[in-house]
Amino acid sequence: MKRMAKLKVRYVCQQCGFTSPKWLGRCPDCSQWNSFIEEIEEDLSPHIQNISAANSPQLLHKIEIGSEERLSTGLKEFDLVLGGGIIPGSLILIGGEPGIGKSTLILQTADNLAKKYGKILYVSGEESLKQIKHRAERLSINSESIYLLSENILEVILDQIQKTKPKLVIIDSIQSIYKNSIPSSPGTITQIRECANHLMTLAKNESIATIIIGHVTKDGALAGPKTLEHLVDTVLYFEGDLHHNYRILRTIKNRFGKTSEVAIFNMESKGLTEVLNPSSVFITERPKKTPGSVITVMMEGTRPILVEIQALVSSSSFNIPQRKSTGIDYSRLILIVAVLEKRLGLSLASQDIFVNVTGGLDVSEPSADLGIAMAIYSSFRNIPLNEKMVVMGEVGLGGEVRSINYIEKRINESEKLGFEKIVLPKYNLKNINKIPNITFKGISSVEEATDFE
C-alpha cells in the first residue's frame, strides 16, 4: 500500500533550534526558559522518484575554477571583511541589534553597486517603500538601478528575482519572510531555515549574490537556528554602542576570505563613513599625565588597533568593593586584580576598581592583560605612565608575562603613531628587529613592568 504524507507536530526551541516531541519548560541544550513553540511539519518520507543522474562525482584535479570577479561594495572597509568583495552567487548573513545601522550600511552598499554593476533588488519585509525612500533621501541615494520590493511571501520574492535578474539581492530581514506552504508563523525555526534554503539554491543556480539581514536575540546571538549560520557562506556581525558613533563590522565566518576581520565605520547624520585609521581615532582624546591611562595594541583579524585602557581605583565606602568593567571581560578583570594582590602585594580588597576601554570597543584577547594590570597599578599608586609608551603582554596566574603573536604588526602600528617605548614580553624580543626611534623593554613578570621609566 502506498504510504501517504502526513503532518507531524514537534516543539522547537527558538534560541538554539533544539527539537522535542513534547513541550518543555526549559531547553536542555541552551537552558533557556519558555523558548519552545509548537510547529507542524510535513513528513516527506515516501520514496523519492525521478532522481536526476546529471549530478555525478568529478575528479578533483579536473575541476576548473578560473578567476571569479568579485563585486566591489565601494567601501574599502566592507570589502576588507568580505575578503576583497562580494562573490557572485554567495549568500551573506548580516546580524546586529535594532537601530545599529544595518539597513543604512546595506542601502549605501546597494547604491555603490548599482552605479557600477547595474540592477539591485532590495526586498523589505518590515518597511514600506516610502519608508525606504525617506531613508534613501536622507543618505542622498537616488540610483536608477535600485529596485524596491515590499513583500513577505517567499514565493513572490523568488518569482520577482527570476524576472528582474539582479546582480545583488538584499533581504531585510529573513525573520519577516515566510513560505505559504509551511503552516507556521514568520520567524520560526522552520520558516527561517526553509526560506534561507530556497534563497541559497536560487543564488547558487543563478549566480546572484544575496545579502540577508538577521535580527539578534537579547544575548546578542543571531535569532533563529545555528543551522542558518552553517548554511550561508559569510556571517557578519554589526556591533557598536548606541551611545557612541563608531560601528564595527566583524567577520565570524567567511568561505571566501579570512575570519575575524573587522571594519570600522563612523555613524553620521548622512550615513556611515569609513574609519581608515582607527588607531589614531581611539587615542586622539587621551588625557595627558593622567594616572590609570595605558595604551595597548589589540589585533582585530589581521589589523592592529591601538586603544586606550583607563582604570580608576578609589577607596570603597561599602563593605563589598565594586568591580566594574566596560569593554573588558569581567572575569578577566577579577583574575588580574587577584594577580596584582598576590604577586605585587597591592592592598586592593578595600578599593573600588573601574576599568574602561575608550571608544566603545571590546577587548577580548589576552595581550591586553598587561595593559589592564598597569592601568590599575598606575591609578592605585597615582603615578602617570609615560605618554609615549605602549604596553602589551599576556599575564599568567603566577604573575609571569607570556609572549603574544603578531608582534611585528603591533610594533609597526605603534611606530606609525609616534610612540617611543614599547613594553612587551621578554620572549618576543628574540623575534623583532631594532628600530632607531623606539626603545624596547622586555619583561618576564608583572613586577618588572612596574618600573615605568
Image (spheres, helix red, strand yellow):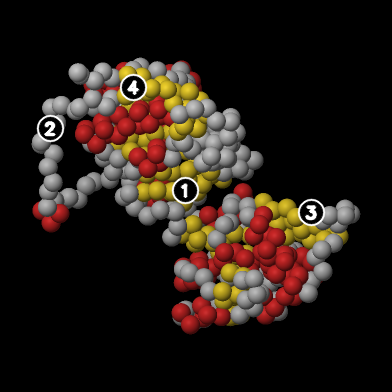
Q: Which residue is rendered at x = 59% and y = 51% of the image? A: 361
Horizontal side of 91 relative to 222 (left or right) equals left
Nearest to viewer (mark 1 / mark 3): 3
| Residue 144 in sight | no
Q: Is residue 267 above or below residue 149?
A: below
Disc 2 residue type?
Ser
Nearest to viewer (mark 4 / mark 3): 4
Q: CA distance from mark 1 to mark 2?
A: 40 Å
Q: Which residue is rendered at x = 64% and y = 60% of the image? A: 332
Q: Quadrant of the C terminus?
A: bottom right
Q: Which residue is mark 4?
A: 42
| Label 1: element kind | strand
Mark 2 nearby-residue class (10 Å; few <14, some 14–19, many ≥20)? few
Q: CA distance from mark 3 to mark 2?
A: 67 Å
Q: Quadrant of residue 315?
A: bottom right
Are the two marked residues, 1 and 2, in contact with CB atoms closer than 8 angstroms?
no
**Disc ID at residue 52:** 2
Residue 237 percent location from the top left of the image = 48, 43
Nearest to viewer (mark 1 / mark 2): 2
Q: Which residue is mark 3?
A: 322
Front residue of this view, candidates 245 and 391:
391
Mark 3 nearby-residue class (10 Å; few <14, some 14–19, many ≥20)? some
Dot 2 or dot 4: first in sequence order is: 4
Dot 3 or dot 2: first in sequence order is: 2
Q: Which residue is mark 1?
A: 250
Horizontal side of 54 relative to 162 (left or right) equals left
Are the two marked residues, 4 and 3, in contact with CB atoms closer than 8 angstroms?
no
| Label 2: element kind | loop
Nearest to viewer (mark 4 / mark 1): 4
